[in-house]
Image: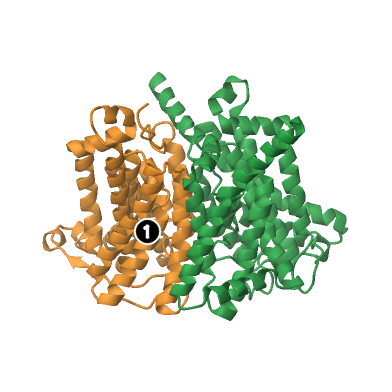
Chain colours: A orange, B green
Amino acid sequence: MELAFAINIIAFVIASTFRAATPLIFASLGGVFSERSGVVNIGLEGIMLFGAFFGMLGSYFTHNPWFGVFLGVLVGGLIALIHAFLSVDLKANQVVSGVAINLLATSATAFLLQKVFHTTGQSSSVPKVKDWQIPFLKEIPFLGEAIGKLNPLVYLAVGLVFLSSYFLFKTTYGLRLRAVGENPEAAETVGISVRKIRYGSVVVSGFLGGLGGVYLSLGQMDLFREYMSAGKGFIALAATIAGKWNPKGAFLACILFGFAEAMEGQFQLLGMNIPKHFLHMLPYVLTILLILGLVGRSVAPAASGIPYEGRK
Amino acid sequence: MMGEDLKKDLFKDYGQKLFFPLVALFISLFAGGLLIAWLGENPYIAFRHLFQGALGSATNFGETLVYTTPLLLTGLSIALSFRCGLFNIGAEGQYIMGMMGAAWVGSIFTGLPAWLHIPLTMGAGILSGCLWGVVPGVFKAKYGAHEVILTIMMNYIALHFTGYLVNYILLAPPGYLPATRVINASAKLTRLLPPSRANTGFFVAIICLVMVYIFLWKTKWGFEIRAVGLNQEAARYAGINVTKNIVLAMALSGGLAGLAGALQVQGIQYRFNDLFAFTGYGFDGIAVSLLGNNHPAGIILSAFLFGSLNCGALQMQSVAGIPKDLIGIMQAVIVFFISADYLLRKKLEQPLGEEINVRRGSAGQEVAK
């Protein structure tokens, strides 16, 4: 009886961990793509917020949550396109441009919320992406309970980790992308277009950031709430760094953050008397510790953050 | 003759410096007008309410100063970090800690004379902000950790930490409201232009702007900070202690943002209310600093501009029905424009580019080991 209870709790924690980690996984993969190509994307936070808003909007207008997913991802890519234009073509300061995207996202989504719903705070409820039951996963003893019935976006996030890893390290395009981030001059010398690769990578990072945002409004919830990204884009970037700009590493870091968030709920359920403020602080303290623990051992792509001026 | 030439050059220089921020401002006003039209309202009427709300009467002008004061200091805080090649996105958290420090010291001491209690309370705010700036400063200087991520994390920690303090440790009895006790009269600043909430804190902020200008451009310490910002490797080669200067810049930057929070408590709120969400003053400081060319003189203009916009937006929202979030969109447009501006970028990139050199430096050390 005791054992069954413990197993249930563990299964529940594992499932909550995956759910909480999913938006971070999408966004941190976005961070990997952008930074590996040499463009810092602080704007992921704002891109997530845009993704969350337009995901909700798409589902609201069509009553089809999958159209919402499509719209959120598309808008994420479009916002990233602004960042790409500024940082690749205009050689803007990438951190400042990212900050501008975040400022824009907070105000623009609140503005649009009032325009469309004539309300502040949060939107009305919209059709959400429903959980899927995966028969063969469900039959795995012990783990099946935890991972057999989750949101399809959770499965997509895990799938994309392996896909991104394969793309970056096993394909020619991945090799080119990494070359552009490490040594753009050399890459250009062998005929790789730095501009095209960087544009492509930043837009892909926007798709992924948008997907992370969509999961917030259509996977975890069924509505948009002002500033619902709540720093998740920044935590995802920290996971990118902690994961050494590697999809699988970033995934593990996100799982750690997801676990911290899942435990937040558990402490409260188990009636432990810890003020909720400390639990809310946990992921952020963890991020700082993780970054400090890996400092020196984690080296950024050499050209990350530097506009490419062309060969001299 | 030479004097004449010098004057001409000076004006040409100022003209260039003013040109791009002005273009950015006009484009953002234009974008704002388009959005108002999209809402189906008349941009002219909306902007007239915006203007009246900000400067239409002595009271409104006083309220504009209320919104300007914290921006002067958070803008200055971020400018100081920029000048050392750091990007302190943590001004928001340092501001929050400053509010909490001032609310605490302002309420626990009773019977102190105002001439002692006022600076003591400000000092508490400065120290609290300082602490919140030094922590990421040390991690950055000693271990090369990325200060942008660190300071952002410190913002969230400040938000939840003060939430804990105000709900548990410093909760004012009987505890119906999540707020600290009201500070004593001896810690409060004098109000000007009643019934507006404008107060002497504005002058404190202006004094700080002058002091930071003198510090950065007229003293040896300021020179060292700017040298580190311009070229870290060269500064190190010239015998300047880079680690010390990064920590010092973050401490001062945090202290200024902390003071902004203290003035808010001593002049406006008189207590710390549970925040639930960020105040925005720290983040707006980024736009203020960038638009002001990271210079105290420019910051006076840009802080007053944003203060007016934020204050006027309230009337625009209540009378003309335009969401005040419009102002945030306009600020973002300005920051976009400035991030892309080539001439200003050159100035900016010198300090900011250092982050890259640090990374390159640490990558190089890896290889050397």
Q: What residue sits 34% from the left and 67% below the top?
A: A54
Name the residue that disc number 1 marks: A48
Front residue of B184 and B241: B241
**Which residue is outermost to the front?**
B1
Q: Estimate the x, y position of residue A236 in percent, counting from the top left.
A: 38, 50
Q: Estimate the x, y position of residue B188 in percent, counting from the top left.
A: 79, 63
Q: Is residue A276 visible?
A: no
Q: What residue sits 32% from the left and 32% below the top?
A: A184
SS category of the residue bearing label 1 = helix
- Horizontal side, residue B230 vs residue A111: left or right: right
Q: Quadrant of the C terminus of chain B?
A: top left
Front residue of B183 and B35: B35
Total tally of numbered discs in the picture: 1
Q: Estimate the x, y position of residue A237 in percent, counting from the top left.
A: 39, 47
Q: Estimate the x, y position of residue B103 in percent, counting from the top left.
A: 71, 60
Q: Quadrant of residue B284?
A: bottom right
> In this picture, is B318 found above or below B235?
below
Q: What residue sits 58% from the left and 62% below the top?
A: B279
- Horizontal side, residue B164 vs residue A85: left or right: right
Front residue of A31 and B34: B34
Q: Is residue A219 visible?
A: yes
Q: Label 1 is found on which chain of the structure? A: A
Binning the other alpha carbons within 10 Å of mark 1 as few (below 14), some (14 to 19) or many (20 upward) gives many
Say what amino acid the circle numbered 1 marks. Met
Front residue of B282 and A247: B282
Q: Quadrant of residue A10?
A: bottom left
